Image: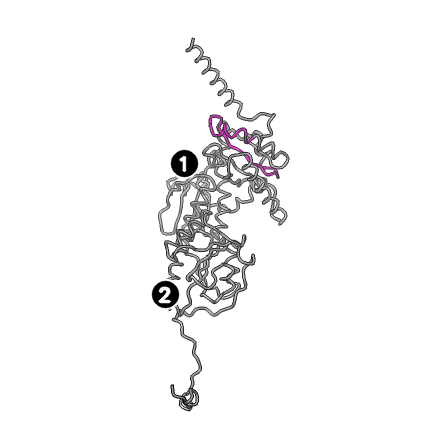
Amino acid sequence: IFIHSMAILIIRVLGCSLVLMAQGFYSANDDVVELNPSNFNREVLQSDSLWIIEFYAPWCGHCQSLTADWKKTATALKGIVKVGAVDADQHKSLGGQYGVRGFPSIKIFGANKNKPDDYQGGRSSQAIVDGALNTLRTLVKDRMSGKSGGSDYSRQSGGGGSKKNVVELTDDNFDRLVLDSGEVWLVEFFAPWCGHCKSLEPEWAAAASAVKEQTNDKVHLGAVDATVHQGLASRYGVRGFPTIKIFKKGEEPEDYQGGRTRGDIIARALDLFSDNAAPPELLEILNADVLKKTCDDYQLCVIAVLPHILDTGAAGRNSYLEVMMKMAEKYKKKTWGWLWTEAGAQMELEASLGIGGFGYPAMAAINARKMKFALLKGSFSETGIHEFLRDLSVGRGSTATVGGGALPKINSVDAWDGKDGELPVEDDYDLSDVDLDDVIGKEEL
């Protein structure tokens, strides 16, 4: 009887699981919109609404745990933000198109529907709602400032848009554009009939646009139709599609081994860029323009206040500058600017950063968009600065608001001439005509 009862229980559990797997997690009574390849284009990509979408698999335990919070999120955001769900186990092509490798994956489809952002926040309904509303505020701000807030899918799928940043390579132009350029190229060899190539196309196009902007057009993404330009495909041993190869000046091409999402492609391209790029320039703060341009153009501007030249001499100062240049090289993948000034030359800048006339050398990193800064607390050395910048790059470390909430007044000063400092010259006095008896007095001590 016990065995019979257990068998019935197992059959019921399996039956419920099979029904759950067949039907998915959500029904027409929920505020979650079930999405699939048939309605995704119409509902999401051609929509002007903000969407937050869960890609799930019915057998995934974490997905099952998320279901109640996802329904609650959809109800809370009803009429404000669209909340969808894709059974990516059933619709593998849709999950693959957006680089879904684990479950649940949550993606936010904003102004550029072909470039969704990964949601990285907590999995409670409150955290998800907060994340969606923050993205919505950003979208509304962009629209008010004149940036495009609508869907650009129709433009991109029509053959224009971001595809223009993918360079079409042929038998005729390949050597001139790629091999003779001296720059880095990632080249996709594709076949028009290849399903994986079609899935890669929007990722490749989006990556091309981002890489062009972030590398100042120094790294390029190209594409070769290998069914038309068979000579090129044969020349580089292409046997399957898509095949991606990396071309660098003076080196044999190497196979691209990374992931196929735009994020993976961009990350590899930026690594290639940084490997071949010169470190950013280390500038002395000579006037207000130097500070403003550097801090406005870069995500962070790293500023050192070095001891007065009379305290260190040229050799001491150069040793500090050498440490900074090594750090600029180490962090050249970051969009950071690097500046220095002499102690006392820019007192208002020092005051706004709380440096205040002591503790040289000192270092601060300013985010001019937020008007926040962080101070180096450790040693002014490769190790100390590395720890300081590493913490900043992952969002750790304490910050404060720049004094006055704006970049301070900057004095115009002469550039350091590279020499040791000289003491100020005082007027010489001829003491030969001075009667010391008159000055001191004639009384005996």
Q: Residues within 10 Å of mark 1 (few under 14, many from 20)?
A: few
Q: Residues within 10 Å of mark 2 (few under 14, many from 20)?
A: some
Q: Nearer the viewer, residue 22 or 371?
A: 371
**Tag shown at residue 316:** 2
Residue bounds of the magenta highlight? 45-70
Look at the numbered disc 1 and give the secondary structure of its residue.
loop
Question: Where is the C terminus found, in terms of image quarters?
Answer: bottom left
Q: For this view, does 187 lie left or right of residue 138?
A: left
Q: Nearer the viewer, residue 394 or 343?
A: 343
Residue 207 picture location, percent across and down = 49, 44
Residue 299 picture location, percent across and down = 50, 53
Q: For this view, does 90 lie left or right of residue 435?
A: right
- Return the residue at label 1: 240
Q: Which amino acid is tagged 2?
A: Gly
Q: Which amino acid is tagged 1?
A: Gly
Q: For this view, does 183 lie left or right of residue 55?
A: left
Q: Residue at x 47, y 54 (%)?
A: 374
